Image: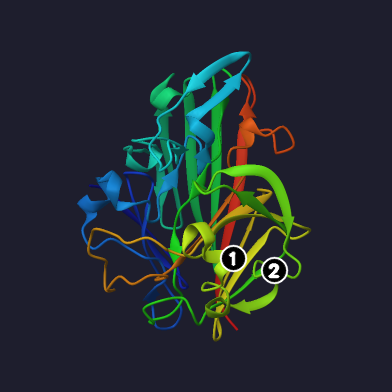
Amino acid sequence: MKTYTLKNEFHEITILEYGATVHTWYSFKEKINIVISNKNLEDYLIPENGYFGATVGRFANRIRDGKFTLNNKEYQLAKNFSGGQHGHGGYEGFNKKKFELVSFKDNELVLSYFSKDMEEGYPGNLDFKVTYKLDGTKLIVKYHATTDKDTIINIVNHAHFNLSNEPNILNHSLYLPAKYVLETDKDLVLTGNLKEVKNTPFDFNTFTLLKDVLFKDEVRLYANGLDHSFLFDKEHVSHLKYKNKNLKITSTYPGTQAYSMNNPINQPLLDRVFEYHAGIAFEHQYEPNAINIPNFSDVILRKGDEYNEEVIYDVFED
């Protein structure tokens, strides 16, 4: 499996050709790996082993019953998530695909993937590119796609972060300026209802210790921790903090899914022993299941249009 390493004075990031996956990310003075990584590269190819650091597509998160209607035609996708739901692009989404090298230099990598018409049930031949670029303390990630037929698209990176050498993120604090958390059913599929975060455990409008949130009954109702979508208010920011260490994520997307590693894993980790809440993912994205909910964002990529989104990860010390 080919790997590519981006390096500057602040970061050393290794990316895999499969899934355009962020495998390791060494930062801070101690040069600690701030993402949860599989120990063995081949484990990234096994669907049951999750999505650590992967580029997820063609449509991230859950789509109810794996169905959507586009241009008066109903499409049936794989029901690969619990409860008969479609999740993260199907049985073999982008995270399991081999990406081709477009260009590579010390601080920038561009990879591409051509997703054929009706791959995993999605219409249209999709040309997709992801760019990783280091700029000082920041990693800038750009997504670009075009299609020859109307389709739906929602791309995220699924890195799970832990800014410490501690075995979990309970002593991390989170600032996430959202007005709403999006209601789900028991299968974690969005219903379309918006719930104000004020006076709930989902209010991260000031920095909040995660150990004070993750064990609340309301948070653990369906997910055993955070596995919730938030709609940003004014700032499109997820800011994780541990002592003087910071991860500040900004993006062009309207929201994010926060996931605190609430499920067991099957494979060994690199330099870590798994325990619940070992890391937390911030999947900046459009609303999950948006194609089936009229009041959510338009997630249709039309023939002749372009999909252009950007996520910026700023990793720094106070």
Figure quadrant of the C terminus = bottom right
Label 2 crowd bin: few (<14), some (14–19), many (20+), radius 10 Å:
few
Asked if disc 2 and disc 1 are in contact, CB closer than 8 Å, the reply is: yes
| In this view, 93 is above or below 198 | above
In the rendered image, which residue does mark 2 sit on?
200
- At a point 46% along the width and 64% down the height, the residue shown is 224
Residue 27 visible in the displayed image: yes
What's the image's color scheme? rainbow
Q: Earlier in the sequence, mark 2 or mark 1?
A: 2
Q: Amino acid at mark 1?
A: Glu
- At a point 56% along the width and 85% down the height, the residue shown is 244
Compare residues 239 and 196 and report the one nearer the observer: 196
In this picture, residue 276 sits left or right of residue 223: left
In the rendered image, which residue does mark 1 sit on?
218
- Percent x, y for residue 67? 52, 26
Residue at the far bottom in the pictured view: 243
Q: Secondary structure at mark 2?
A: loop
- Percent x, y for residue 153? 55, 33
- Percent x, y for residue 270? 26, 68
- At a point 28% along the width and 60% down the height, the residue shown is 38
